[in-house]
Amino acid sequence: MHTSRRTLLAATAGAAAVVAVGGGPALAEDDDTVRHDDKKLRALISRMTLEEKVGQLFVMRVYGHSATAPDQADIDANLKEIGVRDAAELLAKYRVGGIIYFAWAHNTRDPHQIADLSNGIQQASLAQPRGLPVLISTDQEHGIVARVGRPATLFPGAMALGAGGSRTDARTAGRIGGAELRAMGVRQDYAPVADVNVNPANPVIGVRSFGADPQAVAGMVAAQVKGYQSAGVAATSKHFPGHGDTETDSHYGFPVIEHTEAQWAELDAPPFRAAIAAGIDSIMTAHIMVPALDPSGDPATLSRPILTGILRERLGYDGVVVTDSLGMEGVRTKYGDDRVPVLALKAGVDQLLNPPKLDIAWNAVLQAVRGGELTEARLDESILRVLRLKAKLGLLKDPYVTGRGVDRVVGISSHLKAADRIAERTTTLLVNSGGLLPLSRRTHRNVLVVGADPASPSGTTGPPTTVLGAALTELGFTATVLSTGTAPTDATIAKAVAAAQGVDAVLVGTYNVTAASSQRALVNQLLATGRPVVALAIRNPYDVAQLPDVKAYLAAYSWTDVELRAAVRVLAGRADPLGKLPVPVQKADEPTEVLYPVGHGLRY
């Protein structure tokens, strides 16, 4: 059952009166007026207790599909990790200013449930004394990072859009994706990624980046920022000062970026400059060390020279700065969980995202103010930025969403069609020896589909081999599907080789193939059958370098259904291959030599 909008508004009328300071008009949403309303926002801040001020700086996870009645397993997880039962108790105890949604925290089952959860969170927060609306956020990058799945619209991810090369498409994807998030009560999206992926071995960014050319990435970032923000959702470019050239995943280690200051200015800075010029609402920090920008050995998240010296002063950015998750190893290697939030605030951060133990982080900030290490005025500065953003997003006027709004916006036919059209323009044809593609139903009707089946980014698409098989069947082919995984065993390879005997062609989905990967043995043994083999890189386009004997190779950049179906339309000749590599592919045995340069992409 969906709580009616009227009931919710009635329940929070008292709290809303606090927001419209002095009973005056609600805050306007355009930037200029928001600046004039700083006086009202400062009045709000002046009425807060110190504890409420500390709470406003935190953005926290919470388990459960409901703000007040989560499943027992989620109550148990909340009690264990946060010491509260549900979102309502979290807000009553810590007065957090933001909540982040995750699929693994069971926040994102379906659009109506998400909208109800959002309304429940706002109701619980506004019911508190001097209650304020909550800024609800999530990581909806699309492609390989998406927290909200079907029936919401899923778009190609950044590298796919980079391959499409259309800023219009990037902006459209942002606008539609943003409109759907807003309809579900999410008003801050931790996208787009502004990192320039110049390292093929990058384990954490890869296809989440628009590409390797700083200027091209800058153009796509600006387009997406404008798209999201035109829909009334705060975009967040990440991960400042640039996470594109690393071989360490900051979730599990502490990456060091060895760029000189000149290299940083040339390679990493342009997309962030473009985001700022486009009016970006928030920027996320990276848990990386950049000795050229700050020789102290601190991660950028905790670096005053980087966040205040460069981002605020040199780049002139005055919007909200949010940390990457404080539970990640990259920010925890040097300091304890009690020091990290205090040092982040001293560096210039405004929002502290997802600390591993909220009580430790929250109390550490409180004690830092009481002990004089942080001033209350420093907290007020960040709270003002957060409140300005809440005002701009209309949260102080009306934080609620409706079931009707969900039905009118989320996953509607025109949005799904737009996603299909955009995806079709991203598929990249890397190799087509002897004109094997497009495959014809007349000569290659029976197709064996094998390959990797990684879990869906959103939990609602795939598995890839099944999607590819169904897409081929829909186009009149006869498809047999055999999932062989990311590390096929000898027995699995033998089964695939046997299945290939009676078919006209084999389609294999490859996933992050390395020199040691048994996916290479699978493909080579399938080639040895003499059957035509078409390979589709369903994540990194670099796979093609490891499989030089494949006669036809396509890149899809992700394994969500929208990208896989588009790739099948391309390989069957129902759509032209229009994508161009946004990153160079180096030779596998000679990484200094480029096999396929940026801009490579064959046509029929």
Image (cartoon, helix red, strand yellow):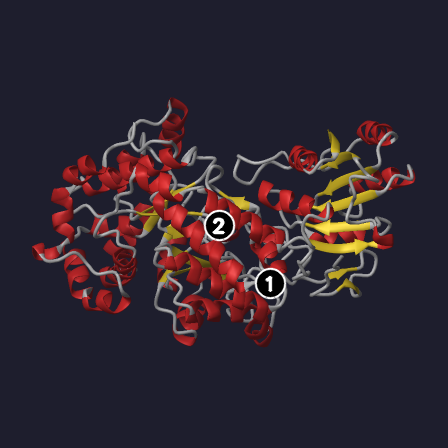
Q: Which mark is residue 318?
A: none
Q: Quadrant of residue 25?
A: bottom left
Residue 14, given in percent of the width and then of the height, sits at 11, 43
Image position, residue 321 (x, y; %): 38, 60
Q: CA distance from mark 1 to mark 2?
A: 38 Å
Taking the image as drawn, is residue 295 in sight? no
Quarter of the image where the N terminus is located: top left
Q: Earlier in the sequence, mark 1 or mark 2?
A: 1
Q: Position of residue 367 (x, y in %)?
A: 28, 51
Looking at the image, the residue that sits furthest to the front is 442
Which residue has dot 1 on it? 165
Q: Amino acid at mark 1?
A: Gly
Residue under the point 34% across and 38% down: 115
**Which residue: 48% across, 53% down?**
331
Name the kind of residue labelled 2 in the image: Arg
In the displayed structure, would residue 522 be above or below residue 145? above
In the displayed structure image, the side of residue 98 where residue 147 appears, left or right: right
Q: Position of residue 435 (x, y in %)?
A: 84, 53
Residue hosting label 2: 332
SS label for mark 2: helix
**Looking at the image, is 50 positioned above or below residue 128?**
below
Q: Are marks 1 and 2 in contact (CB under 8 Å)?
A: no
Say above or below: 348 vs 529: below
The 10 Å Cα crowd at callout 2, few under 14, some 14 to 19, many 20 or more, is: many
Horizontal arrangement in the rendering, residue 48 relative to residue 255 (left or right): left
Task: Return the residue nearer the eye: 335 or 145.
Answer: 145
Which quarter of the figure is the C terminus placed in? bottom right
Residue positioned 37% across, 22% down in the render: 72
- Tell me, yes or no, if residue 549 can be seen here: yes
Q: Secondary structure at mark 1?
A: loop
Look at 34% across and 58% down and name the residue there: 350
